[in-house]
Structures are given as structure tokens and as C-alpha cells.
Amino acid sequence: MTIKYNNVYVEDAYTVCGPYENDGPLSNYFDKKHEKDLYFGEKSLEKAEVHLLKEANKNILSKNKLKEDDVDLLISGDLQNQITSSNYMARDFDIPYLGIFEACSTIAEGLILGSTFIEGKNAKKVIVSTASHNMAEEKQFRNPTEYGAPKKKTTTFTATGGVSILLSNKKSKVKIESTTIGKVKDLGIKDVNNMGAAMAPAAASVIYNHLKDTNRDPNYYDLIVTGDLGIYGKEILKDYLKDKYNITLGVNYNDCGTMLYDLDNQPVFAGASGPVCSALVTFGYIYKEMLKGKYKKVLVVPTGALFSQTFVFQKESIPSIANAISLEAI
Amino acid sequence: MDKKYQDIVDKHTPREDIVKNALISFFVGGLLGSLSELLLRVYSMTLNLPRKESGVLVILTLIAIASILTALGVFDVLVSKLKSALLIPITGFAHSMTSAALEYKNEGLVLGIGANIFKLAGTVILYGVVSVYFFGLIRLLIMGG
Amino acid sequence: MMTYIYAFLFCGFVCMIAQLILDNTKLTPGHITSLFVVIGSFLDIFSIYDKIVIYAGAGALIPITSFGHLLIHGAMETAGQQGPLGLAFGIFNLTSAGISVALFLSFVLALLFKPKH
């Protein structure tokens, strides 16, 4: 399903990142950088993730001199069970709240919903936020964080950060031009250490459908980015898109997971992942470069793996989702 | 499972450094073995203990070192470099327990640490015990004791 | 003197096998250590691991295989005196030091430290 928008703009974005992202190549694009550790003064890892979301959302309000009353809707999601990071952040904000989840494609789901509320004239200003926290996610999905289980080369490194996006009907430099809602795809990948392979089919499907629905080809965009397929997932996507959908991605294609870190010098294996990965790269780097005029038309395709430990242990494979967001500088 | 897709995935999945990892595990594991034997003899001589008791002390020493290095945040870095050489000796067992205890302290003494300390090590104890009931019985039947 | 060499060879060998399994299968460290414990107790049905300990000394005592060896030894010592029920009575005798110290230290350290990135 593809929707075009006439009145939805990115009024502003606020990005918070952790130490690893601060050491990466995009560090200068983030508004707030935590350098010391991953606790940010909080007692637990989970509370630290809440901290990131609160920080991003509080700052976007103050930076734009807005009161909570000025915002019609707060949409947020994250990787914690029951999306507790977003819920515990939301209790500090007196704004109608929709908690959402699509793993690392959560930000796209949020942008689609927020945009549709604005286009349908049910909201004038919507905040969409997401966060992830490397250690909190390791604890929940893998092993105790101090446990040193050897990692495979295809493993990705969950990014730490919080991102808040202010959508509004007020004309701004960057608009949400259109969005495509993806379909869940599962081609039988059971390897939780190879998320790129699990998610590429969903990315391919939504890219194909978006281009078909808008009658465009990949060259229409200055930049097409997927969320967090990683070094190997990127190649899998390119081959699979060509093979199944006869679409060739050229030099204008990149993956946020391979952009967030210095892959040669940081211990991040196949690249960054997590809901905040695509959000940091898109609304830190890409958005700021669009404001400067470097990119005019960008297609962002955050990718998510919709599994749980329980289902993986029950020998299930990993279904995935991806949604497409078309950003345009006007 | 989509076979054609699996082929594309396999094409772009890097091989782990199997030989390098195996050699590191062999040499570091071997070194640990020899050093432990040295330590056993040192305990035996300085504390005047028979080999059996010294052996237990060596095991306890390794457990203590692994737990302390885990708490200091160093052991996981060592494991990522030295691989199975640190996970297979009793150091791995201690490391799994200390890392689990550290992780869950925020959830309380009972519901956090207590409920989770055996998260990774429990399987070793469980199957060790289960196997002994089977194999012990077999040995009793075959060899009488 | 040869004990040092056999210690090196045996412990190194066990670690290497574990690493090969880790890199070539979907088994995790948890699976492999569990398997090795079972192997350790299995090898003592016919006192094979006992012989390995004689040759390789501490090199045979420190891998997790020795945990299985110690469990079955403890069990057999009391089973020898008391019959099959003795298995239950003695099983943890030789491993009580290791398990209790690991528990105690983990607890104390958890109170004093927290996980770092």
C-alpha cells in the first residue's frame, strides 16, 4: 500500500547517541552525544534506554519552543519487551500516545502513521520517536552483557541512541512525499546471527512495490538506504532484487548499518542494527544533508526482524518487515 | 526454505576463520593446561598437599580469576580473542555465573541474581548429573563399583 | 616433565575440538560444554578419564570434561559403599568446592560491580 502526502513535513529532528556512535564517522551530525558509558546516570540498562527517549523528546520540544499541548500525538516504539522504553518515556509526556512495534522498522511504521494522521487532518503536529540500547538488547535477546560468547562475522551491533522526529503540516524544507507499507516476508532463515539475510526479502519486496506504485525506477532517488542489513545483507539484497524483481540498485544505494560505524576500526562485525540505527543515520546525517541541499530525493527503507527468542528456540524461522519512506527536499 | 534464496545467502556469508580460531584455541588452551599443572605442583609443594587436593585448589584458583576478571569487564574481551580456550576450562563455567549475576542485580537479590545466576551454567550441572545417574548405574552393573 | 606436555596437548585438544564445533555447527557454548560434561562422565564408566588425569595432570582437570569426571567419581565412591542409592549421596562431593565457590564469588562480585560496555 503506497500513500502520497501533500501536507506532511519534517519540521525538525533531534538525535541522541551513545559512545560507539560518537566514535563513528557520523558523530558530528548528532545533537547530543554520550561519551562515557551506556548508563547515562541511570541505575539500569533498561532505564538508560528510557533516558534516551526522554532526552530526545524533551529536547525536540524545547528546541522548537513547543509545549506538550502543541503536539497532538506521540508515537513511539523500541525493542524492549512490551516496548517498556517508550511506555515509561510516555508517562512523562502529557500527549496522546500510540505505542508501536516493528523491531528495527519501528521508526518507519511511526512515520507512516504520523504522516497519515496529519494528511487526514486529524493532527497538526506529531512526534515520532524510537531508541535502542546495545547492552539492554544484548541482555534481552542474547546473553548477559559481560558474557563473552564468540560472535559470528555476520552478527550486527545494536546501536545506542534515541531519535525524535517532529512531523507537522507546517511547510518545511523536507517533506514526507510518500510511504509504502511493507508485507511480512519469511524465506526460512533461522540464523539469529545473520539478520541481514533474514530481512533482505522484506526490503526487496517493499522497494519493488514502492517503485511499482509510484511508477519510478531506482534512479529517481539520489539515495536509497536500507535500515540495517549490514555488509553482507546489502549484497544479498542487491542480488535478490535483481534475481526476483529485476531491479538493479546502483551506486545510489547504501545501508544505514554500514554507515553508522567505522567498520574497519570499531568492533562492530557486520555493521549497526537496532531501531535507532536507521533513525540516527536518516535524521542525523541524511536529513541535515538534505537541508544543505546535498540530497533532494531519498528513499529510506528501515528493516525489521519480527522474531522472539522463544520462537527461535521452538525452531521457527525469522519473519521480517520493511517499510519505505520517501523524503523530498523542497 | 527457499532454496534459491539460500544460495544467494550462502554466496554472501563469510566463512569464520576456522583454522585460525582452532589454532588459537589449541595453543592458548594447551598453555592454560600446562600452567595449571605448574600451579598444581606449586600448591602441592608449598602447602604440602596431595595431588588430589591441589587439583581442587587449581580449579578454585581458575574460578576466582575468571569471576574477578568478568566483574572487571575484562573477561569477555579476552574470550572474543582467545575463544574456546577460555570457555571450555572451568573458567567458562565461572564466567557464565558471574556475568549472569552481574546482569540481573538490578532486579533484586532473589528475583534478579537468585533466579538467573544459573542461566547459562545450569545446563552443565543438569546434564552432568543426569549423565552420571545413567553412566554410574551402567558402571555399577558392569564393574560393580 | 612429560605431564606438562600431555597437559598442553590434552587441554589444547579439547579446546580446539570445542572451537571447531562452534565454528562449523549451530551449537552454542552451552551445548558444547554440556556435551563435554557428559563425555567426561561417560569416559569414566571404564576409568578412561582417570587414566587421562594420570598422564595429563591438571591439563585434564581444568576442562569442563573434568566436571563430569568429578561428578561420577563422587557418585561412585559412595555407591561403592552403599549401593546404587549411593550415587545420589556422593554425586556432588568432589564438585562442591567448585560450585559453591563459583556461586559465592559471583554473588559477592555482583554486589560490588556492574556490567560495562
Image (tube, rainbow, N blue to C red):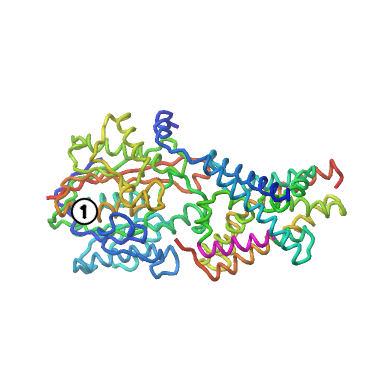
Query: Where is residue A175 drawn, in percent x and y?
Result: 16, 51
Could you tell me the amino acid type at mark 1?
Tyr
Query: Where is residue A25 drawn, in percent x and y?
Result: 29, 54
Residue drawn where x is 80% and y is 42% of the image: C46
B25 vs A277, left or right, is right
The residue where tag 1 is placed is A287
* Region in magenta: B58-73
C18 vs A102, left or right, is right
Task: Kindly indicate the quadrant of the structure image that contains residue A26.
Answer: bottom left
Task: Kindly indicate the quadrant of the structure image that contains residue A196.
Answer: top left
Query: Where is residue C115 drawn, in percent x and y?
Result: 49, 63
**Does A288 sit above or below residue A324?**
below
| Res A225 seen here | yes
**Residue A242 magenta-highlighted:** no
Q: Residues within 10 Å of mark 1 (few under 14, many from 20)?
A: many
**Does A294 sit above or below residue A234?**
below
Magenta region, main secondary structure: helix
**Residue B64 magenta-highlighted:** yes
Query: What secondary structure is marked by label 1?
Result: helix
